[in-house]
Image: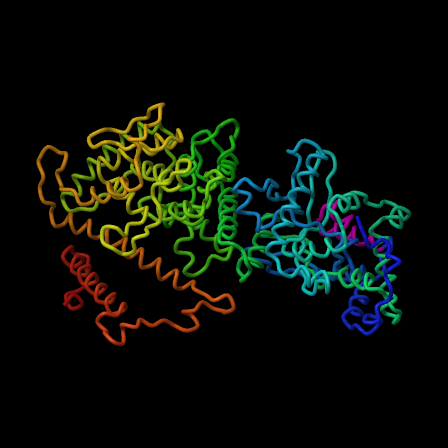
Amino acid sequence: MDSSASLSADDHPDPAVNGHDPELKARAEQIANLTWRQHQAIRVALIAIGLPKEVASNTAWLAADPQHMLDQLKRPRREVLAVGVTGVTVQTDTLIAPLLRAAENVRMSDKRYEGTFSLPRYGTANRNAACVLDLRHYGDHQAGLAQLEAGIGEIDAVIDANNKYGADIAENGVRVGGILFPLLVDLTDKHLLGGWETADCYGRTYFVQQSENIELRGLLDQLWDIPTTRQEFNAHPMQARRARLLSVAGKVTNGTPVTAAERSMLIRAVMPSTKMVLAVEGAPMAEARRRIVAQQHLDRPTPFSSDTQWQTRAEAVLEALEQKERLVAPPDANQAQVRLWLDAPAKAVDGVTLYPDDIAVLAAATLLPATDTAQNRAITTALRTRGVMGTERKEARSMVAAHVIARAIPAKYPRDGRRSALERVLRLGDLRGIVVDTRPIADILADARCELDKAGTTKSEGEPAMVGSATKQILMRAGFYLTCGVGESTFLERSAYGAVKGKAQEPGELLRKLAKTKEGLEQLAQAIFDGRRQYHIRLVEKGQLAVDTPSPADESGRMTPAELRDLALAMNSSKLGEGNGKGEQPKAAAVQVREDTDDLRSVVGSVEETVRVMRGRKDSIAPEPHVDEHGWMDPLATTAPESGIVYRLRQVADDLHGWSLLHKKLNGSGPTSEVAG
C-alpha cells in the first residue's frame, strides 16, 4: 500500500531542506504521537456523540495531534452548515493517508444518468449517524470491492482531467482544509467498514494518496483491521506510518538533514484545519452532505459543467419530494418505484419498464406542478439548497425537468441539443399541472379530439381556450419523441431563424400550434405511436387519422423536420372553418389578434433568451460578466435614436400596455378613467 515504508539508498539529505524551510518545520510541529489510551478515548467520545462504532474505531488514525482532537471533542461546535442544516463539528489537522475518497462525487452526476457510472449514491444510517455506501447488490464482498475500485478509478480520471493543482499538491502538500463526513461501507450482510470520506476535498486527497502510492484496497484492509488490544494497536500499519512521520518530523525539528523523499512524505501528510461533521439536524446525513458540497463547489466559479450542476439540482429536488411523499405516482406504484424510474428510466422497476414518454409525463407531473401548491413550494426550497437564486430561478423547473427526462435518451446519442429543445417545450405554461394518465394513447387521443372541437367553439367567440388534460398528454408525450428523437432522427430543434415573423418559433410554440388543429393533433399522436416502436415517424396525410401499426413506414411515407415545421406554420395561417363543411371564411379579428399574441410571445421568448446569453458572456480571466463590468451600448442609439433597440422596445411596450389598460377598463376590471386617460 505504502511506498514510503522505506527510503531508497539513493535518497540523500537535501541541503535545501535542512532546517531552513519554515513551512516544513510547521508541518513537523503538526504531528504528534498517538497512544493506545488516546485511541480508545477518541473512540469512546465519538460513540457518546452518536457516531457508529465502526467509524469511531477508525477516527484516531486521522488525528495529526490526538490530544488536540480530544480537546475539541470535549467542546464540539454547533453551527449552520448549509441551507436548512445545522450540525456538530470539530476542526483539527488530519492525516490524509487514512481518508476514504468519496464514492459519491458531484462531478459524476451527469455520467451516472448517462449510464456510464454505476456506483450508487449515499444513503443514511439509522439515527442519522453517518452516510452509507451500500454495495451489497453486487452480490458478494469481492464483486462489490471490484466495483468500488473501478468507480473510484473513474472519478480519479475525471479529477486528473479537470483539476490543475495536482503537481502543486504533490510538491507542496495541502494548504487548505476540507470537510469530512462519517461513512459506512456495506460490502456484505455481515460487517460494515467505517471511516471518514472526502466530501469536498477529493482532489486534494487523491493527489496526496496517489503520490504516496496509497491504494484503495490496501487502505480498506487496514481500516477493516481495527485493533482491540494494545499489542494489535502497536503492530497496526497506521501506527507504523505515524512512527515514520514522527521520525522525519523529529529530524526537521532538531535541524537534522532530511532527504527529498522524507521531505515529500512529511509535507504531504497533513490536511490543516479540517472540519469533521459529527452530527447533523434538519436533513438526512447524505442530503446534508450534498447541500454542503453544492455550497462549496456549485456556488463558486469552479469548472463544473452546466449538466453536472443541473443533475445535482435535479437529485436534490427528487430527494426532497420523495421525503415528503410528493413524487407523482401512477396507480399501484409507490414513491420508491417512481424514484427508480426517474433515476434510471431504461431499467425495469419490479418487472415494469415504462415507455420514454411515460417517463416524460411522470417527470413533468412531478416537477412542473401548478403554482401556489405545496409541491411547487417544496421544489423552490430544494432548488435554493443547490444555489438556484435570482434570475436563474425563472427557468429552473424546466431545466430540472429536462435533465431528468433526458435520462431516457440512450447514452449513445448526443444529449445536449435534444435536451435544450426539450427544455423549450417544458417552458410551455400549458404543461403546468399535467397529471399522470396511464390509459392507452388511443383513448387519450379520443378525448383530445373532443377537447379540440370544444376549443374551436370557444375561440370562434374570441375567448381564450384552455388546453385540456388529454391534449397536455399528447403535447408532452409527442414533445419527447420530436425533440429527443427516435433513434438518430430528431424533428424539432432550437430555432435557428432568429426573430423573423412566422419562423421564430421555438419547439414549444410549434407544438402548441400543432395541437390547435386537427391535422396537427393527429401528427402529434402519430409521433407517439411510432416513437414507442422506435420507428421513423410517418407523415399523416391531410384528412387521415393517426394509426398505431406494427410495421414502419416506407421511405416515401416518412415525415421530415421541414414537413413538420411547415405543417405547424401552415396550420397557423389556415382559415377558420376549414374542414368544418362551412367553406373558407376570413377569421374574426379577435381570433387573429389571439394568434398574433402567440407569435409575439414567441418573439419575446427569443429576445429574453438573447439577453440571457449576453448576460453570461465573460472572458476567462474576468471576474464578472462583460455587461456587468462594462455595461452595454447600442451603436444606433446615438446616431439614430428612434432606431435604437431600447427606444423601439419601449414603444412596443407602451402600445401593449395601453391596449391592456383599455381591455381592463372595458371589461370592468381596469384602472380609473384618470389613469386610462
Q: Is residue 532 above or below residue 79?
A: above
Outermost residue toward the bottom?
A: 638
Q: Is residue 50 magenta?
A: yes
Residue at horizontal 69 percent and vertical 65 percent from the top: 175
105 and 36: which one is in front? 105
Residue 504 left/right relative to 239:
left
Asked whether residue 126 appears in the rendered view, the answer is no
| Image x and y of residue 517, in percent | 22, 38
Above/below status of 138 relative to 654? above
Q: Residue at x 72, y 60 (%)?
A: 170
Q: Can residue 601 be seen by looking at this rendering? A: yes
In the depicted view, which residue is nearer to us: 512 or 526?
A: 526
Which quadrant: the C terminus?
A: bottom left
Residue 355 % position (x, y):
43, 32
Residue at image coords 67%, 59%: 166
Magenta span contains residue 483: no
Residue 53 appears left or right of 9 = left
Residue numbers of the magenta segment: 38-59
Secondary structure character of the magenta stretch overall: helix
| Picture coordinates of residue 198, whole percent (x, y) | 67, 53
Q: How many marks?
A: 0
